[in-house]
Image (tube, rainbow, N blue to C red):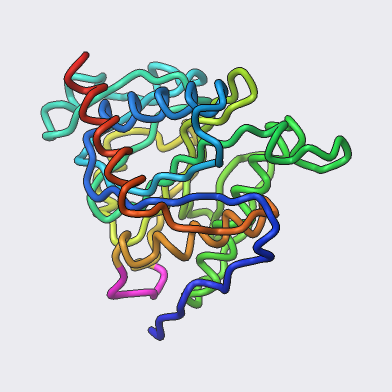
Amino acid sequence: MSRQSPPPPSDTTARALRWAWLGIVPYATAWDLQRALASARHDGALRDDVVVLLEHPPVYTMGRNGESRHLPGGPDALRALGAEYADVDRGGSVTFHGPGQLVAYPILLLAQSFPIPRHPLHGDVVAYLRALEAALIATAARYGVAVERRPPYTGVWCDDSKLAAIGVKLARGVTTHGVALNVCTDLSWFDAVVPCGIDDARVASLESLGATGLTPQEIAPVLAAELAAVFGQRCAPLQADSLAALRDLAASVRNAA
């Protein structure tokens, strides 16, 4: 499978979407980091929108729309598999995060990022979800994988197999949580749950769909660029000192917990 470089930056006059690859980060640490970044973005201490991209150690998370039947064996059965379990404040039901999966958490101030009232993303969480799907579809296409939406469900699909899950939260105009794209994930982890609460759904990865030899770190800048494109923003990596500041913030949040 040929590898392609990220698309070129858009107009330098556009508002920036700053991105950072953080490597493998425990779920609780990443969740605390998101909340700290969202607060800073709302208060103006963080001037630009940010998307953090990472992998998690094995963890199952249950969103606000989850039901107990989506966890046939309950949380203890998931922990017995060697994974963590967390109830979280995003939309959607249960999903798995783990090695080989690229997770992206955009921290966007929607009203400020898209100040034109008629802009399709001006404070509109549904339009925001559709934009996330568009970025995922474009990312998969860059590796020769054709996926599409499957209304009324959220996410992107190849036939009846879900390649990427989406679950978000919008509070005080700022987004948290985000997308999980299976790159080379061990899909057997999903066998223990009803993924996203959809009874007839299967799960796919880029690898299972023919795009082999890829890693989440390799795809991270591509997804960041496609996110910036659908948001109408300029994609720009965080500078080394900013990335260090993010890591310091994550460490301070973890130590204070």
Outermost residue, bottom side: 2
Q: In this view, does 124 lie above or below 255?
A: below
Q: Nearer the viewer, residue 249 or 71?
A: 249
Q: In which quarter of the image is residue 242?
A: top left
Q: Quadrant of the N terminus?
A: bottom left
Residue 60 screen position, x and y as percent: 29, 31
State yes or no: residue 213 in magenta.
Answer: yes
Instruction: Give the residue displayed 57% in from the left and 73% down from the top.
Output: 8
Report the number of discs.
0
Q: In this view, does 193 lie above or below 42?
A: below
Residue 256 screen position, x and y as percent: 21, 14
Q: In this view, does 255 lie above or below 246?
A: above
State yes or no: residue 108 in magenta.
Answer: no
Q: Quadrant of residue 230?
A: bottom right
Q: Which of 66 and 176 is in front in this view?
A: 176
Residue 135 screen position, x and y as percent: 59, 57
Instruction: Give the residue displayed 77% in from the left and 35% down from the top.
Output: 122
Q: In this view, does 1 lie above or below 206?
A: below
Instruction: Give the residue displayed 52% in from the left and 65% down from the top.
Output: 139
Q: Quadrant of residue 78?
A: top left
Left or right position of 8 against 194: right
Q: Which region is colored magenta?
A: 209-214
Left or right position of 245 against 111: left
Left or right position of 226 against 179: right
Outermost residue, top side: 257
Q: Which of 87 and 23 is in front in this view?
A: 23
Residue 141 screen position, x and y as percent: 55, 71
Dominant secondary-structure state across the stretch colored magenta: loop
Q: Quadrant of the C terminus?
A: top left
Instruction: Give the residue displayed 57% in from the left and 63% down from the top.
Output: 147
